[in-house]
Image (tube, rainbow, N blue to C red):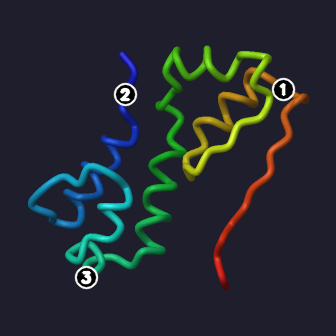
Amino acid sequence: SPVDLHSLLIRGTAHKCGLQYVPGTFSELLYDKDVSKEISKYNLYMSLLKGFSLKRFRPSPALVDLLSIKQFPFVITTSFTPVVEQTMNDIWHDELSVMRFNNNPK
């Protein structure tokens, strides 16, 4: 059965930061006052990015089916996980064009 990657990483990070509860979302995790005391947001993002790059995680069959539909050649995602992009690359190969937007004021 597919692994819920987001929940797994949120749980692991919450445990690493010593939280007494498991946040429901990445936003809740990143903006928790106790997390910000333990680890900088940059280090937390980098830690999560490393977790997402693990090869053992695969997209769900439903995601593969959705991204394979030729009538939807344009996909926007706000996730920083590579799962959607990797899946689309596997499906579309050279037809895939990726654009990234980073709203970082620095």
- Does residue 36 lie above or below 85 as drawn? below
Residue 3 - label: 2
The local crowd at label 1, few if under 14, some if 14 to 19, many if 20 or more residues have their Cα within 10 Å, is: few
* Real-space Cα separation, disc 1 to disc 3, in angstroms: 43 Å
Residue 37 - label: 3
Label 3 residue SS:
helix
* Viewer-proximal residue among 77 and 98: 77
The picture places residue 32, in percent across and down from the top left corner, at 26, 70
**Sequence-first disc among 1 and 2:** 2
* Viewer-proximal residue among 103 and 64: 103
Q: Amino acid at mark 2?
A: Val
Q: Residue furthest bottom?
A: 106
The picture places residue 22, in percent across and down from the top left corner, at 18, 52
Q: Amino acid at mark 3?
A: Lys
- Left or right: residue 51 compared with residue 17: right
Label 2 residue SS:
loop
**Sequence-first disc among 1 and 3:** 3
The local crowd at label 2, few if under 14, some if 14 to 19, many if 20 or more residues have their Cα within 10 Å, is: few
**Sequence-first disc among 2 and 3:** 2
Name the residue beneath numbered marker 1: 93
